[in-house]
Amino acid sequence: MSTPGNNERYPTLSSDSTATDIDSTHIEALDAALHQEWALGRNIILTWVPRETSIDILVIPHYMLSDIFSDLNHDTDTPHDFHSSYAIKDGPEVMIRDVISGPKMSDDDHLQYFSRLFDAEPHTIDIPFTPGLEVPYQTIESMVKRYGISYVEDRAVVLFDIVEFSLLSPLDQVAQLNSLAYSINSAYSKMLDNDIYVNFARTTTGDGFYIWNRDRSIQANVDLYHFMHLILANNAIAHSKSLSSSTPLLRTGFHVGGHYEFYQSEGLSPTVYSYIVGDVTIELSRIVDQALPGQVLLGDFLVPIYDDEDNTRFKLDTIQFIEAAQDRLSSLNGLVLSGDKINSIKCYLTGDKMGDRKEFTVHRYMVVDKHFRGRNVYNAKINIYREDSEPVFLGLQNSELENFKAVFSNFITPTA
């Protein structure tokens, strides 16, 4: 068995089974059992362990997670310090965060550890199949996640906010949300045409959408940024052609950060699609609140990236992320936008020219929200050049930021 506290403690999700030709009655039987343990949303499933013809799960009331974190934060001595037959390298808080952010599939040692920590006995679910053989572990993992909570530490998220949405008539509100939804779907179709797959999810804010990539990697984050470009371009072209108020004017934010992911109840079952809430959505909301109509703002973030060659990890800041995004943009050349092929796209953060040189600085602004909390942001521009049509310019130039309510700005000289 693997030892709790070890970074490699979770078993692999690989199986001898594939996702094809799965007996649907197996899935239905497992889902029915999980649904019963979920108890209409009262409980969450924290972790599971496969057996020969069953799985063991640890079920806890949903409020217990916040309660135990509260205990850990207010008690300098670990309140759940108990003797066990194996070594614990990390404290309970780290262990809980890891099981929330990592695979739910675990092993006996961890099942026992969390059982004692939460004072809850594991439940055995008898199933008419062998996990990993007749049904892949990954399929079971996906099903269990619908009845639990996950935490993602560093995911990119986009927020599209419709300007003056609350002042529109209900009919115009519906029309503008539909128009934005169409721009999202159209951009997705265009990326597929160029063999760029964004496994995107979205949830409405009431007057716009949060959008994120379900995949997790630096490339997934970059692809989401380009997905944002195409959505904005589609919307801008539609806005220029529209003679009515059916096409929205947008304020847009892009940020990378942590969030919780969960599945809300829909009727008596959890939804198929997930919802997110956490630091990244809060930050985006505060950032976009300060944005001007048509402006694109980026948060001040760090994105982890892994070097497979020497197994090292380092982080890209916002400026370096945009440089990586620009390098990837050639993959969109030739894509058709409103009937015309794209020749090139340029994305950059605005700033001032450095004397007689061709280089530019980057301005970093500080904005203050309604709670008097300051945060750093960057103003982004995207220029899309098409073969036989006028360019599409997205975002605002420095000269258009006169009414931007930044309380402070400084400039940064990007490194080559």
Image: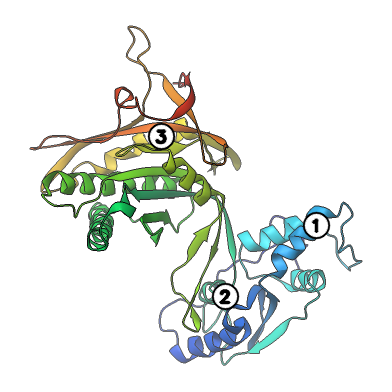
Which secondary structure, mark 1? helix
Horizontal arrangement in the rendering, residue 51 relative to residue 134 (left or right): right
Residue under label 1, please give it.
72
Image quarter of the N terminus = bottom right
Q: Position of residue 34 (x, y in %)?
A: 58, 83
Residue occupying the point 40% across, 37% down = 297
Residue under label 2, please give it.
147
The colour scheme of the drawn protein is: rainbow
**Mark nearer the N terminus (2 vs 1):** 1
**Mark nearer the N terminus (1 vs 3):** 1
- In front of the other: label 2 or label 3? 2
- In front of the other: label 2 or label 1? 1
**Mark nearer the N terminus (2 vs 3):** 2
Amino acid identity at mark 3: Ile
Estimate the spatial distance between the alpha carbons at disc 1 and disc 3, rounded to whole Å.
39 Å
Image mark for residue 195: none
- In front of the other: label 1 or label 3? 1
Horizontal arrangement in the rendering, residue 134 relative to residue 208 (left or right): right
Asked where in the image residue 414 lies, by quadrant, the reply is top left
Residue occupying the point 28% across, 43% down = 331
Residue occupying the point 11% across, 47% down = 241
Asked where in the image residue 174 lies, by quadrant, the reply is bottom left
Amino acid identity at mark 2: Tyr
Residue under label 3, please give it.
322
The vertical placement of 338 against 363, above or below, is below
Estimate the spatial distance between the alpha carbons at disc 2 and disc 3, rounded to whole Å.
36 Å
Estimate the spatial distance between the alpha carbons at disc 2 and disc 1, rounded to whole Å.
25 Å
Which secondary structure, mark 2? loop
Q: Kindly check if marks 1 and 3 are in contact, taking CB atoms under 8 A apart as contact.
A: no
